[in-house]
């Protein structure tokens, strides 16, 4: 059984979420963050920054041969992003479901992209695609001391165990 001070191992899964410059410029930070919070996920890391080219390129390294890579990096470095670490049961996969698919017009209503965006180059949010990617991306964007370890008092009202 989980003690009152220890989190269930599943509910500790973390994912890296990033609100891109379009989301920040459109003042959608609160709208998007609130969806994760209302769902029951915990925000354990959060900051606003304008990424360097080096950081943006490292983040999207898997796409460096793609034709859209330069535009993507130009866009990400064009203004502030919100870097977020979300924690909770199955956080990586559930966040991707909440976000929708890469193309906003193929994203179902109810998803973040499906409700709030139209164009693939302005799809407002990033979410890690696997637990392994999440680990890499969190390490890229955050120092360990910038991530908190806590258990909200409503834990037993979000999780049965
Ligand atoms: P994601 O994991 O759903 O964000 O999608 P990917 O990892 O495949 O691509 C990373 C980001 O690159 C996407 O979120 C888009 O912003 C951008 N992107 C992907 N495919 C295209 C494309 O065909 N054209 C353009 N302009 N941007 C793209
Ligand atoms: Mg991706």
Image: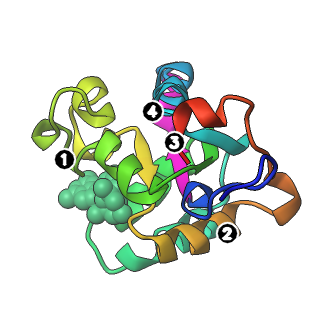
Q: Residues within 10 Å of mark 3 (few under 14, many from 20)?
A: few
Q: Which mark is residue 160?
A: 3
Q: CA distance from mark 3 to mark 2?
A: 33 Å
Q: Earlier in the sequence, mark 3 or mark 2?
A: 2
Foreground tag (4 vs 2): 2
- Residue 95, compared with residue 69, is above or below; it is above
Residue at mark 1: C-beta within 8 A of ligand 1: yes
Q: Which residue is mark 2?
A: 140
Q: Which mark is residue 22?
A: 4
Q: Could you tell me which residue is drawn at 81 percent across and 63 percent down? A: 143
Q: Earlier in the sequence, mark 3 or mark 1?
A: 1
Q: Is residue 49 visible?
A: no
Q: Is residue 69 visible?
A: yes
Q: Which residue is mark 1?
A: 103
Foreground tag (4 vs 3): 3
Q: Residues within 10 Å of mark 4 (few under 14, many from 20)?
A: many
Q: Which mark is residue 123?
A: none
Q: Position of residue 27 (x, y in %)?
A: 52, 19
Report helix, strand or loop for mark 4: helix
Q: Which residue is at the far front?
A: 1
Residue at mark 2: C-beta within 8 A of ligand 2: no
The segment highlighted magenta reads 14-25
Q: Earlier in the sequence, mark 4 or mark 3?
A: 4
- Residue 137, compared with residue 43, is above or below; it is below
Q: Which residue is at the far right?
A: 145
Q: CA distance from mark 3 to mark 1?
A: 35 Å
Query: Do the CB atoms of the residues marked 1 and 4 lie less than 8 Å apart?
Result: no
Q: Could you tell me which residue is drawn at 25 percent across and 25 percent down? A: 115
Quadrant of the drawing holding the N terminus:
bottom right
Q: Position of residue 47 (x, y in %)?
A: 73, 41
Query: Do the CB atoms of the residues marked 3 and 1 lie less than 8 Å apart?
Result: no
């Amino acid at each position: 059984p989980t003690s009152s001070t220890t989190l269930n191992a599943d509910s500790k899964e973390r994912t890296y979420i990033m609100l891109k410059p379009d989301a920040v410029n459109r003042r959608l930070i609160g709208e998007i963050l609130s969806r994760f919070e209302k769902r029951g996920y915990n925000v354990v890391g959060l900051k606003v920054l304008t990424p360097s080219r080096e950081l943006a390129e490292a983040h999207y390294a898997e796409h460096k041969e793609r034709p859209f890579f330069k535009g993507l990096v130009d866009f990400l470095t064009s203004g502030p992003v919100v870097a977020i670490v979300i924690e909770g049961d199955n956080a990586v996969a559930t966040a991707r479901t909440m976000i929708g698919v890469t193309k906003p017009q193929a994203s179902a209503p109810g998803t973040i992209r499906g409700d709030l965006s139209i164009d693939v180059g302005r799809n407002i949010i990033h979410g890690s695609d696997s637990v392994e990617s999440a680990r890499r991306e969190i390490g890229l964007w955050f120092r360990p001391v910038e991530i908190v370890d806590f258990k909200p008092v409503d834990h037993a009202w979000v999780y049965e165990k």
